[in-house]
Amino acid sequence: MSDTARRFAGRCLLGLSSLSLLVLTACWEDEPRPLVQYTPGVYKGKPHTPISEEALTRARDRALRQAGLASSVPGGGGAAAPSSVRPPGNAVIKVRPTGSGLSRAAIEAQRTRTLRSSGQ
């Protein structure tokens, strides 16, 4: 047998033994199984860490500020910054013909009714 054939046979033997070892060790029977039973309404994880009253107050204040229901100044010492967002009632509605077969007059009448109902 030539030197090259011996190396090839040795590598094949090493590869097969490594593969069989990997396959056999991947199936341990005493391996711990994760909890997979689901019971509706029952939390089976680690208990939550308690949150301090100060952290809870800060989180509530932040949520109120983000919702625009509280002042943006910590401690409530001033008015909230003016919003650059247009109120929902002032929406600009553009009606474009989309091949629906409506005449220009019908489209304009629909636009007028929509603008009247939105208060413009």
Image: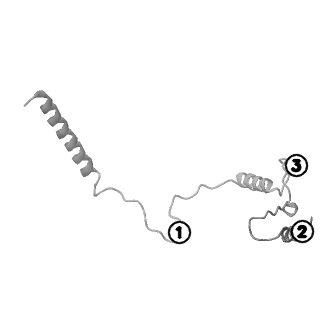
State the separation of the CA atoms marked 3 and 1: 44 Å
Residue under numbered circle 1: 42
Residue 115 percent coordinates (x, y): 89, 66
The local secondary structure at tag 2 comes to helix
Q: Residues within 10 Å of mark 3 (few under 14, many from 20)?
A: few
Q: Earlier in the sequence, mark 3 or mark 2?
A: 3
State the separation of the CA atoms marked 1 and 2: 55 Å
The local secondary structure at tag 3 comes to loop
State the separation of the CA atoms marked 3 and 2: 34 Å
Q: Earlier in the sequence, mark 3 or mark 1?
A: 1
Q: Earlier in the sequence, mark 1 or mark 2?
A: 1
The amino acid on which the numbered mark 2 sits, given as a three-letter code, is Thr
How many numbered markers are drawn?
Answer: 3
Report whether 45 appears left or right of 101. Answer: left
Q: Is residue 79 above or below residue 47?
A: above
Q: Nearer the viewer, residue 44 or 94?
A: 94
Q: What label sits on residue 81 in the rendered view? A: 3
Furthest residue toward left: 1
Whether tag 3 and tag 1 are in contact, CB under 8 A, the answer is no
Instruction: Name the residue: 73% across, 53% down.
Output: 59
Residue 43 percent coordinates (x, y): 53, 65
